[in-house]
Image (cartoon, rainbow, N blue to C red):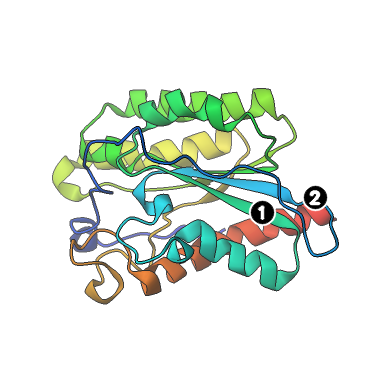
Amino acid sequence: MKVFHLAPLILILIYSCNNKPVNNSEKMPDTTKATDAIGKTAKTILFFGNSLTAGYGLDDPSEALPAVIQEKIDSAGFSYKVVNAGLSGETTAGGKARIDWLLKQKIDVFVLELGANDGLRGIPVAETSANLQAITDKVRTKYPDARQLLLGMEVPPNMGNQYVTQFRAIFRTIADKNHMAFVPFMLNHVAGNPKLNQQDGIHPTKEGTRIVAANVWEVLEVMIKENHE
């Protein structure tokens, strides 16, 4: 699998993932069961993350990452329902506290996209790592047969070389330890490009989101196909 590296100048531009207070009254995702065209119950893919998953700043929920992935799934003829469980401003600690509620419905594939806001706040990497591991453990305990995919992130170089290096390593370590599928950097080819980001220079535009979705789909499609074999 390819590992993508980002130039330091680009990294300066990518972060905040909507670093605003979390609105806990925000509507939670619809986790009702879906059926395909012939009435068969669809399997569920849960995208669990922050504003990058939620679709912050986009004109319509249909433009958010999980919705674009749903388009790809439908076009490929797979029977999966994608649930958007993104919450703007979410940290790994917040995700750890929130995940149990979402696991009330069975899931078949779990996509974990958290950590960027931890990095922005300079949260110790050991704490971020522990929270990501705890989330992964909760999913595995509740649904041991569910496949898991981790979306990697990076922090800007002004956080200091040691922190940058340690933060980047968290995601690879967690993925390897838990035998998770892995996208090293979900914003590859998007971060730092003004044409692909909103005015804040942080969150992808509709076009940028479709490129992010292509990065994720490259790995997720393989997972889905393996489940059908």
Residue at coordinates 67% horizontally, 25% vertically from top-left? 142
Up/down of 41 relative to 25, above or below: below
Is residue 88 found left or right of 131 in the rendered image? left
Secondary structure under the numbered disc 2 in the rendered image: loop
Question: For the residue carrying disc 2, how many other residues have a C-alpha within 10 Å: few (<14), some (14-19), or many (20+)?
Answer: some
Residue 96 point in image, percent of width and height = 45, 26
Task: Choose between 79 and 158: the one closer to the eye.
Answer: 79
* Label drawn at residue 41: 2
Q: Residue furthest left?
A: 158
x 22%, y 43%: residue:
19
Horizontal and vertical percent for residue 109?
A: 65, 44
Q: Residue at x 24, y 36 (%)?
A: 163
Horizontal and vertical percent position of residue 165? 30, 41
Which amino acid, by three-letter code, is at mark 1?
Answer: Lys
The quarter of the rendered structure image containing the C terminus is bottom right
Q: Write down the quadrant of residue 21 in the picture.
A: top left
Q: Give the residue type at disc 2.
A: Thr
Tags 1 and 2 in contact by the CB under 8 Å rule? no
**Left or right relative to 110: residue 18:** left
Q: Work out whether 178 lies above or below 100.
A: below
Mark 1 residue element: strand
Spatial CA span between label 1 and label 2:
9 Å
Foreground pick, 6 / 223: 223
User: Image quadrant for the N terminus?
Assistant: bottom right
| Residue 48: image tag | none
Name the one closer to the observer, 126 or 5: 126
Q: What residue is shown with label 1? A: 81
For mark 1, does the 10 Å Cα neighbourhood hold few (<14), some (14 to 19), or many (20 or more) residues?
many
Foreground: 220 or 38? 38
Q: Earlier in the sequence, mark 1 or mark 2?
A: 2
Residue 157 placement (x, y as % from top left): 19, 49
Locate residue 219: give its quadrant: bottom right
